[in-house]
Image (spheres, rainbow, N blue to C red):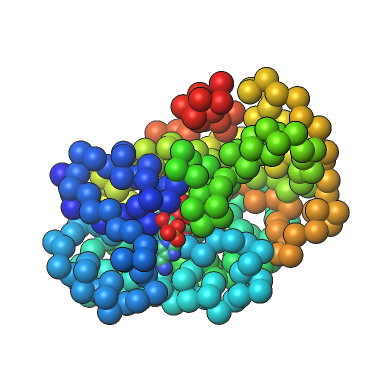
Amino acid sequence: MKKIAVIGADGQLGSDLVKVLKGNKVFPLYYPDFDITKPEKAREILSQINLDIVINTAAYHRVDECEENPQKAFEVNSTAVRDLALICRDVGFILVHFSTDYVFDGKKKTPYVEEDTPNPLNVYGVTKLAGEYFVQNLLERYFLIRTCGLYGEAGCWGKGTNFVDAVISLEKKGKPLRVVNDQCVTPTSTAELALRIGELIQTQHYGLYHLTNEGQCTWFEFAKTIFSLTGKKPLLIPVDSKAYGARAPRPSYSVLENRKAEKVGLTEFSPWEKALKIYLTRKGYI
Ligand SMILES: NC(=O)c1ccc[n+]([C@@H]2O[C@H](COP(=O)([O-])OP(=O)(O)OC[C@H]3O[C@@H](n4cnc5c(N)ncnc54)[C@H](OP(=O)(O)O)[C@@H]3O)[C@@H](O)[C@H]2O)c1
């Protein structure tokens, strides 16, 4: 049994981690009582608990907003992560931290492996990459997880919703749906990601990992599959990124290969379609 703090414990990934890790002694930490941008208070709280592991799911990840507010993005995604890494180094905690497929520029067109060189296209990606560098440079014992296209039962707090719930809610309002069809990703279930994290932290195979469900699709194909599984037929309109007009540029291809996870013998992720079906069933959509 390990003693584990989960930062952002009511977020979509955080809440699934709290569920999965319940065989351990888990300390859920909630914003704003626990705020990673307040390092002195964070140090005081974390040092008082006799921990083995700190898991940080907190991020500022409204990708378009980050373009307008780079200072806040750096504060939450980079500087606060540096401060958290320093606390972990000083007190001797293992840090589990999450990063993103958006550290890549999408030019590769085959799944990115951990050794590929990042080249973020937007402020969010730059700040998450800076966070990665702090973790890697300050710590020896860390699990740094890049993941992609998360959806979970709690819904994404930072974005107000997640993609699956958002398109289902728009369909209910009878609205036509314009969905981007030139960005290829891997939708990933936080329930399944949390299970793999639970496995990984039992090991001492520290380092950088890509962890996502298997397979790939565009956001349009993802929406199409959601509606074919739920038996709905909304007007779905594929659009390209330019026509969609989001403020932040995004990679056209950001599929991650779980190469290192396979090397260390982690249970293989399911295909994204299978994980999606489980999610839709659990949420009562099918
Ligand atoms: N969502 C995606 O599609 C996606 C894709 C790739 C990578 N990621 C990464 O995966 C991680 C988890 O994402 P998620 O979707 O589970 O996020 P989420 O649902 O937004 O959860 C984040 C949690 O962190 C809390 N938080 C925000 N600012 C904080 C602060 N300054 N101090 C402490 N807690 C704070 C939030 O609380 P409040 O809600 O009260 O603010 C929320 O509980 C993030 O690192 C993200 O960058 C996400």
Quarter of the image that includes the C terminus: top right
Residue 4 as seen in the image, left or right of residue 228 = left
How many numbered marks, from 0 up? Answer: 0
Q: Is residue 19 above or below residue 127?
A: above
Residue at 31%, 45% (x, y): give it.
18
Q: Is residue 144 visible?
A: no
Image-quadrant location for residue 96 = bottom left
Q: Is residue 140 above or below residue 181?
A: below
Residue 205 as seen in the image, left or right of residue 59 = left
Q: Position of residue 113 (x, y in %)?
A: 56, 51
Q: Position of residue 185 (x, y in %)?
A: 65, 45
Q: Is residue 141 visible?
A: yes
Residue at 71%, 36% (x, y): give it.
173
Q: Position of residue 48 (x, y in %)?
A: 15, 68
Residue at 58%, 39% (x, y): give it.
165
Name, please, the residue furthest toward the front.
Answer: 173
